[in-house]
Image: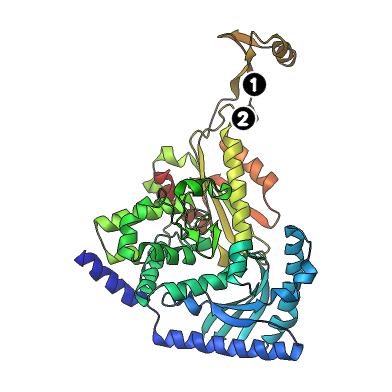
Amino acid sequence: MTELNTILIKVLKSITPTAQELNLINDINKKLIDILSKAAQKLDIKYTKIEPQGSTGIKQTQLRDDFDIDLFIGLDYELYRHKYKDLSKSKLKKESKKDFLKLCNNWIIKSLSSKEYHNPRLLFAEHPYVTVDYIVDKLSIKVDIVLYFDLDLNYIKNYGPITAVDRSPWHGRFIRDNLTSEQKDDVRLIKQFFKASHCYGDKSAVGKVGFIGYSAELLIYYYKDIKNLLIHFNELTDKPLDYYERDPKDLEKIVHFQQDDLIIVDPIDKNRNVASSISKKAFKYTNFKIQEFLKDPKADFFNIEPIPLLDSSKVSNEMLTKIFIVELKNVKPNIHYTINRDKLYSLAESIKIIGEKEYTHHDRFKNIEYEVYFEEKIDEYNLAFYCISPKISDIYVRRGPPISEKRHVEKFIMKNPDFFEKNNYLWVESKRDYSLFIDFLKDTIRSKLPENFKITNISQANNVKTTSAKRALFILVNLVLPFI
């Protein structure tokens, strides 16, 4: 443990924000709050508070060189309640989006007119928010300004939030009040480890979503310190973490928890699993890296390196024939990357399901695995596939009804005059729509691809075009397939 302690202390020194960084973020927050509050006074806009949230805000769990700022503006729900009375959840969501959009356009964006604030723009997640780039002396800092309903904690615990971000300020307060400064340093260490493993956040290279900041903070809260967390990390899939100390059997009865691989219950909302979005792929690879680190502790495990390009010369020919790439260009940059990511994961999952089985449920291309990898700044998105049987026969034998079921037998014979009998069943040879996975892949992509994407290449792995696609293939081959 002495060696482990030495490494953790060394790494922590290199990832802790400097006093200069902290002061800069604090100054930017003060200026923005002043600008927004003065504009609100002129426009007679009511709000409850404007405060910095997230890791650089009241949590103070950020890493060095992490300048991204989240500024949250609270709205008094009582001022809006009459408008939303008796509305269904979906209609309330639409109406609140309209109100937030109006405030974003008429208040927030118009306030950001001084020279430091570049390109204030609307983005859409659960509801619209404003992003602006604060640029001074060649330093560019992204600021997200988010509106939310400032709800009482008891209201959220009893009725849930009105919008998804209504919980976020309470998350910040919980971490601020329940983690010591030493534990916040441990959060920095585990976040750095997740990032070095390419399994962090909604841009996780492994799996759809990796370990988010709040999940990292709660892991330290539950396990007390990073060493205890690392030692017990491989138990996470078997031991739900519940702030409310419910019996695991009771948690299993909660319908929307039943498909989740990990359970980390949100202290702010007992019906929310913070880990619900964390991909099983991300967990498996992170767990592998943690076990490696515990066996042979080195500071290198915390180094964030670019994802390598797949070197096809180091992959067997047999493996290469089973790997395929779809290279795409996003032609509508205003669409948020999480929307693109979700659509492509949905498309890839559809290809897996349809590709593995014929419509009759007979085997088709058998096991198919995939990964989605994107580089948002250059709008390149990639789907990498592994298909265990990329070439299959044109014909497959399909089983019909048992000979004893006369009514079904008659119908089957009418549709399939070339039937034959075997083992007390009727059978027929059927022609496949596809015998080559590459043909199936091309046609499916072309018919189901969202319109904001342009296809730049669909091929086997040895004909890959872009560096981002080579990274996608590296991830599939080295960070996904070995752990499935």
Query: Which of the marked residues, 1 or 2, is nearer the chain's N terminus?
Result: 2
Residue 313 or residue 403, whichever sits in front? 403
In percent of width and height, residue 283 lies at 43, 53
Quarter of the image with the N terminus in it: bottom left
- The vertical placement of 427 against 385, above or below, is above
In percent of width and height, residue 295 lies at 25, 55
- The vertical placement of 412 against 317, above or below, is above
**Label 1 close to label 2 by CB (< 8 Å):** yes
- Residue that protrudes farthest toward the left in the picture: 2
Position of 184 with respect to 99 (left or right) is left
Tag 1 residue = 430
Name the residue: 73% across, 16% down.
415
Secondary structure under the numbered disc 2 in the rendered image: loop
Name the front one of labels 1 and 2. Answer: 2
Graded by Cα atoms within 10 Å as few (under 14), some (14 to 19) or many (20 or more), the crowding at tag 1 reads few
In percent of width and height, residue 11 lies at 31, 72
Residue 142 or residue 60, whichever sits in front? 60
Q: From where the camera sits, is residue 456 visible? A: no
Tag 2 residue = 358
In percent of width and height, residue 210 lies at 48, 58
Secondary structure under the numbered disc 1 in the rendered image: strand
Name the residue: 62% across, 67% down.
155
Quarter of the image with the C terminus in it: top left
The kind of residue on which mark 1 rests is Ser
